[in-house]
Amino acid sequence: MNPIVNSFVHHTLAGLLFGGSWVAALLGTAWLTYDSPSAPEASKATKPIVIAHRGASGYLVEHSEGSKVLAHAQGADFIEQDVVLTKDRVFIVSHDITMAETTDVEAIYPDRHRKDGKWYFADFTWAEIQKLTLHERTRKDSAERAFPDRFPGGFGQRVLRLEEEIQLLEGLDRTTGRRTGLYIELKGPEFYRKELSVSMGAELLKVLKRFELDEAKDRCFIQCFELQELVSLHKEHGCKLPLVYLIGSPIAHEKLKELSSTIAGLGPSLELLATRSAEGIVQSTGLVEAAKEAGLVVHPYTVRKETQPRWSKSLGETHRVLLELLKVDGFFSDFPDTARRAVDGT
């Protein structure tokens, strides 16, 4: 394990065992904090931004308080928040609209699943969800861990509301003198439109307005796989924040210019960015170049130590292709410390 992570985990566990918290454990060992100037503004970045994917999820349970604190300590410029809604319309930080993959809902509410055998956040109130504990991700329809070699979790990690995470990161910024940004993904807007008769985008803007972040273009991105939700945010709700369209399959390059009137960026899967020839030569597919020509920033997802895109043979090569060949504007990583070193050239 990375020595910084090892020290963080050691001090964090000690803090928890003696009645502390993730935050207190980190702040009690301030030397662990990444020593850097303030994070660059999104619109004026002189080098690619490091986006912590679900926090430092390669080291600690995704979207847990500890994962977000560690991502901040490791120097992430932006930290991601996937958000879903509860029955009473509270934004929860979770990658899935279902609950069993990352919580102990099966043990706490064994009879609350739907006919499809799944537990949905939309069927529970925030008060009910507070009784749950996060755990390391398991594979869908299986108790097998998705990443067997990662930190196993435990220690009573709780599900976070979006408001709590915003407060946490703002507090860490004040304490450390750094400036991190939010990178919020709306999960399943169409699902919630049908289930709760609500516009996720409109509800999110209300939350961000309370924190004076609804116009903070250099501190907050909103991303989504559902293009219509981004269009609605732009046209119906006058969203002033940069909107990023996530894609997992090829898109016509000529369509990017058309989309540039609505979105500020493209979030493609790593697989879409390059190819590798039989001779081992990595070449761009042209997607990054087309997006930049359309005036869009490009923030691909997700760099991991365990697996590389088909065009890469190693983590180092993945970083080199992203930074030197493709010159992306930033990228998501489960391991913010390795991404930070790659971007900084250290």
Image (tube, rainbow, N blue to C red):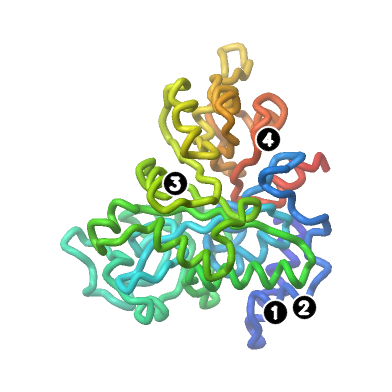
Comes first in the chain, label 3 or label 4: 3
Q: Can you give x and y, in whole percent of width and height, for residue 91 in the image?
A: 42, 67
Of tags 3 and 4, the one toward the viewer is 3
Mark 4 near mark 1, Cβ–Cβ under 8 Å? no
- For the point 67% across and 63% down, the residue is 70
Residue at the farthest bottom position = 19
Q: Can you give x and y, in whole percent of width and height, for residue 49 in the image?
A: 68, 45
Q: Is residue 79 visible?
A: no
Q: Can you give x and y, in whole percent of width and height, for residue 37 in the image?
A: 82, 55
203 sits left or right of 158 in the view: left
Q: Is residue 159 visible?
A: yes
Comes first in the chain, label 2 or label 4: 2
Binning the other alpha carbons within 10 Å of mark 1 as few (below 14), some (14 to 19) or many (20 upward) gives some
Q: Quadrant of residue 181?
A: bottom right
Label 4 and label 1: CA atoms lie apart by 33 Å
Q: Which residue is mark 4?
A: 319
Indicate the quadrant containing the C terminus: top left, top right, bottom left or bottom right: top right
Mark 2 near mark 1, Cβ–Cβ under 8 Å? yes
Of tags 2 and 3, the one toward the viewer is 3
Label 3 and label 4: CA atoms lie apart by 33 Å
Comes first in the chain, label 4 or label 1: 1
User: Which numbered dot is residue 90?
Assistant: none
Choose between 289 and 277: the one closer to the eye: 289
Q: Which residue is mark 2?
A: 28
Name the amino acid type tagged 1: Ala
Name the amino acid type tagged 3: His
Residue at the farthest left position = 115
Name the amino acid type tagged 4: His
Name the amino acid type tagged 2: Gly
Q: Which residue is mark 1?
A: 24
Label 3 and label 1: CA atoms lie apart by 39 Å
Q: Can you give x and y, in whole percent of width and height, for residue 72 in the image?
A: 69, 61
